[in-house]
Every structure is written in C-alpha cells, then in structure tokens.
Amino acid sequence: MSYPFQINSLAQYHADYKAAAENPDAFWANVADNFCWRKKWDKVLGWNFTEPKIEWFAGAKLNITENCLDRHLEKLGDKPAIIWEPNNVDEPARTLTYKELHAQIIQFAQVLKNNNVNRGDRVCIYMGMIPELTIAVLACARIGAIHSVIFGGFSAQSIADRMQDAKASCIITCDGAFRGNKIIDLKAVVDDALLQENVVQKVIVFARTKTPVIMMDGRDVWWDDEMNKISITDFTVAEEMDAEDPLFILYTSGSTGKPKGVVHTCAGYMIWTTYTFVNMFNYQQGDVHFCTADIGWITGHSYIIYGPLAAGATSVMFEGIPTFPDVGRFWDIIDKHQVNILYTAPTALRSLMSFGNEPLQGKNLSSLKTLGTVGEPINEEAWHWYDDNIGKNKCPIVDTWWQTETGGCLITNLAGITPAKPSWATLPMPGVQPIIVDEKGEETSPNPSEGGALVTSGNLCIKAPWPGMLRTTWGDHERCRVNYFATYPNLYFTGDGALKDAEGNYRITGRVDDVLNISGHRIGTAEVENAINMHNGVIESAVVGYPHDIKGQGIYAFVIYNGEQMDDNILRQNIAATISKAIGAIAKPDKIQFVSGLPKTRSGKIMRRILRKIAEGETENLGDITTLLDPDVVAEIRDGKV
Ligand code: WTA
C-alpha cells in the first residue's frame, strides 16, 4: 500500500517539486489532510526570514502522539512499532506493537503528570537506547511537555549547561547503560550535573543495568514504582497542542559559544518527518526500517521515532555498538529482524569496511531493499563498498543531506525513483528551494570543473521555508536570526559548502564555518578551545579539523602551554581529560601540538586557514603570511611535533 503523498515516479517527483514551489499552501494542505487534527488550520504558511517568523498550519490543533499511535490502533494495533535489539546478544529482543507502545506512553504520561510535569515544562532525557527512551519522548509530547534529549556520551557539565539553558524541571535517566562491554553510569553523571545550581525538581530513573545508584529522597524516583502507582482509570487525555507549540529542543553545536537549543514545533515537524521518511526510502507498509543513529541526535528523533511511527512503520532500535560482540553485529541484526531499510552514517561504513569482507560471510542480507547514509559526505570508496557488499548492487542508496535545524532531510535522491550519483546528495525534496551563493550573497554561476563539466560552487542557502525548519533557538531568538538569517538577507544559511552540476544535482562539500563533523557528530571548534583553555597552564589554543580516513574529520589542537613542566604525552592526556569533563569523550582531539605562538593577524585574529593547511600536512603553499604579526611562528608550527 502506498501513501497518498508518496512519490511513485520520476515524472511525479518533477510535478510535485513544481507544485510545491509554485503553490506551497495548496501542496502542503493536501499532504496535511492525511493526518489527524483536532482542528484544521486557518492558514497554511506565513513567513518572513528577517525576524525570522515562520508559521505552518497556524490555528490548527493536534497532538503528535495521536498521529504516531492512536490513529494506527484500529488497523495496525498488533503490528510491531518498535523492535528493540539489546546490546547483549544473549538477552532476548523486545517487540512493542502499536497497542503496547500506546499503552506504555499513556501510562508514563500520567507518571509525568503525577511528578508535576505539565504542558510547556521542559524535560531533559539522558538514557541509553532502550524502548523506555522512546516512551519518555512520546509521553512528554502526549502532555505537551517539551523534551530535550541529551546524547549519553555528553558529560555532567554538558548536561548541567543544557538543563540550565532549558530551565528543565525534570530529568529522566537510567541507572546505567550497556555499550559494548562497558556499563556507563548515567545516573552518577546526572548526580554530578545536579550538584550545580539548577531548577530540576524530579529525577525519574529507569533500572536497566541494576548498578547501585544513590537516590535522593524527595527528588529521585524509580520508573517502575511510579508506573505501578497508576491505575487505568487515571489516564489523562492527550493535550491539545497548537500547531506552532514547541515539541522539543535539541542542543547542537555552532561556530561560537555554547551549543544552542534548536526548537522544532508540533505540526510542521510531524508533516516533514513523515513526508520525507516515506519518500526518501520509498517506504512501503510492512517494511522493517533500521536507523542506526542514537536518539540523542536529530537523526534518531526524526527517523527512529517520529517519522516512522507517524507513517505506521516498524522501527528497529539498537542499544549497542556496531563492533560488539564482533564487527558483524549490524549484519546479524539485519538477518535476525529481516530489515528492509538500513540507514547509517558513512563513518560506520568506513569503519566496518576496514575489517574486510570476512565479517559478512554467512550473513543473509537478502531482506534489504533500500540503503541510506546521513551525517557527513560519503566518499566514493565507501559508497561502492556499501553498494557492492551490503546492497549487492540491487538496493538504491540514498545520500540524505540535512541538519538538526532542518528537522528532516532536504536534499537526497529518492530510493528507486530519482537517480543516485555516488557522493552526491542529488536533488532537493519537493518544498525545498536551494541556492548557491558567493561570499556576498550573489547567486554563483557555473564554471568548468576539473573534468570539464560545468559546476556551480559556493555556500548553500535555502530560499523559502519548508514545514520542518527550526523556528527559533531556545530563549534567544536573536541568536537564531544572527546564526542562520543574517549572513545573507532573506536566505536561510546552512553553514555548508556545495557544488551543483548541470542537471541540478547537489554535492555537499562540508562546513564552511568553524563547525567540525567528527564521525558525523557536530562539534564547534570554539567549544573545544574553551574546554582546553580551562586546563591549568594553558594560555591559548586553536582547534581545526583535518581529513581522517575513518571519522571523516579529526580534531587537531594547537596549544600554548606555560604551566608546570611534565612529559608531553601525559600533558596531552590531561588536556584530553579536561575536554572529556567539559564536553564528553567525543570531543577529545586526535592530535595535540604544543606551540609557542599562534599565527595571528595584527588585529589579533587567528588565521585558521594556515593552521588547517598545516593540520592537513600541507607544508609548501601556506598562502600569504606577510600580514601576520609574527610570520616566524608559522615555520615553527610547521616543523613542530605532534
Ligand atoms: C553534514 C545531521 C554531506 C553537513 C542530520 C550538515 C552531510 C551537518 C550530510 C549537520 C550528507 C549531514 N552529506 N554532509 N548527506 N548529512 N551532513 O545537525 O555538514 O548533526 O551541516 O544533522 O552534517 O549535522 P547535524
């Protein structure tokens, strides 16, 4: 069965693209008619990119969980909504049907109410990849509380920063999380975060690892105890939300300062994630979808939880890591759960590819129909390995480009419908109007590329709103304006560089700002520098990215240190520990080089261009260095040791 808004042919893609561009109101009203509303909208779209103010389906009333659950119960009630694969292979997998998931969510929604969480309140969620994480997210949405999921790899300090910024009154966590052969003590990290001044009144703890934890009387309660207190007669009805009420906040790194809280709203985000989920993967009812992302990132929000469930799909959720108990784990999961769609990151592919094809022996991957990648550019070698060995040249690969801010995918080929081009994200979704501009904001013109074909290159912007775009950054609308809408008037600036070929295909070349993409995880250079500078004796530091075979990009830190003398390697470890404490282990540098100075202009600006070249191993063409305050420092850095 296909969906009424499903794109079934190349001709239809072009027709829908045109229709959405020419008359967005009519196009999206048509799509929105397939959802369940308490009240329909007064106006489909109102917008300006100067404040910015973006409103989709103003006046409409809905609850997103009724769209993800209730409306499916009659026909799909016994269909698996979530198939959960635990970290440990000897623990049985769990399946939650739509009926079961629905029952758990309304029950936990009541738990939240009993713990004084109400509409509009912010709830942080810091859990491992277990079904209760999905239940917690949807229970918040059920009562209109705004969830903010924090990736389990972030430190106590990062949690404290996020709780403080969101003014969260409740945090939901686990005693611990299983990750490969490790147990991560999540509750202990939360306790640490709560030592700082904060507004959290309740901590709800799910017992997953049965590791001992300290429970503070009056503040900390067990998930199971709270669930057991509730009788079926207690259940409250789903909150009636306005289309533009915030659904969640997700913190993400930018080029300056602390991570910002990207805000998505109920109706637009729902429509966008469902529409893109169905169309990019060419999802057919009955397909089993496996997205390997963590729900702590946007990919997990949109394509493990909201998009698939709103489409009535079966979504696989995996607790562990691709290399445990061995590097064949993904392939075992595909075989075991008869996965039809695999959606993963290029980093995971490059890492699995490095083990050769032996781990694939004896794994039956014949259920696969569609493959996808997300999070970073995919190199051609990894693309072909994916195509040859996983898809056996029979499965379309979709290279989906998007961002935390875009809510769902903006540029991708559509599986089996529009053509793929290795390492190109290809064509925009209907409703998305990209434009490539130069530094001044002028649309760039095509130039002959190395191979002779005409390509346009520059900074990628979007001209008009799509339903799933961010509306603001939490508590600081001006930051949203400055970050995304002030670089070029009347354009949303993505922060990415791109190429466009003569057929209109886009290739994303990477960030043009000071944001790094390490293994598909976004990390700001300024954040890492601030963390390094907290280390005693560090005078100053500069962080840049450099090409890394597996991770895509690695972190390279140049550090001026004037503290207590010690062995360089011990000092490197100490600095890495400082970063782990401030941000999390994901932000640890791959390389730290001690230097006596940094290349600065006379006005004191660090010339990162030079540092980037040195980090890339380029020693010859460092460009013009005559404007530097102290040009000699460049030779010292170039010849220095890491
Ligand atoms: C990068 C992840 C190339 C890009 C969904 C973007 C990609 C950043 C692709 C957003 C892709 C994402 N090809 N680059 N298919 N997908 N990116 O917010 O630089 O974690 O700006 O969202 O990842 O990362 P974020």
Image (cartoon, rainbow, N blue to C red):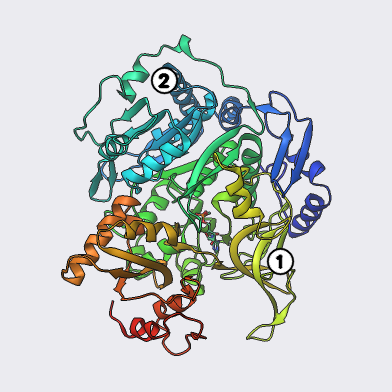
Q: Which mark is residue 382?
A: none
Q: Which residue is mark 2?
A: 111
Q: Could you tell me residue 225's position as x and y percent?
A: 31, 19
- Horizontal side of 249 relative to 268 (left or right) equals left
Q: Is residue 32 above or below residue 502?
A: above
Of 620 and 429, the residue lying toward us? 620
- Horizontal side of 68 relative to 134 (left or right) equals right
Nearer the N terminus, badge 1 or badge 2? 2
Of 211 and 444, the residue lying toward us? 444
- Secondary structure type for disc 2: helix
Residue at horizontal 49 percent and vertical 76 percent from the top? 602
Q: Which residue is mark 1?
A: 441
Residue 14 appears in view:
yes
- Indicate the quadrant where residue 538 lies: bottom left
Q: Is residue 168 above or below residue 183?
A: above
Q: Could you tell me residue 360's position as x and y percent?
A: 36, 63
- Indicate the quadrant where residue 215 lies: top left
- Horizontal side of 436 relative to 88 (left or right) equals right
Q: Is residue 12 above or below residue 554?
A: above
Residue at horizontal 68 percent and vertical 62 percent from the top? 427
Residue 129 appears in view:
no
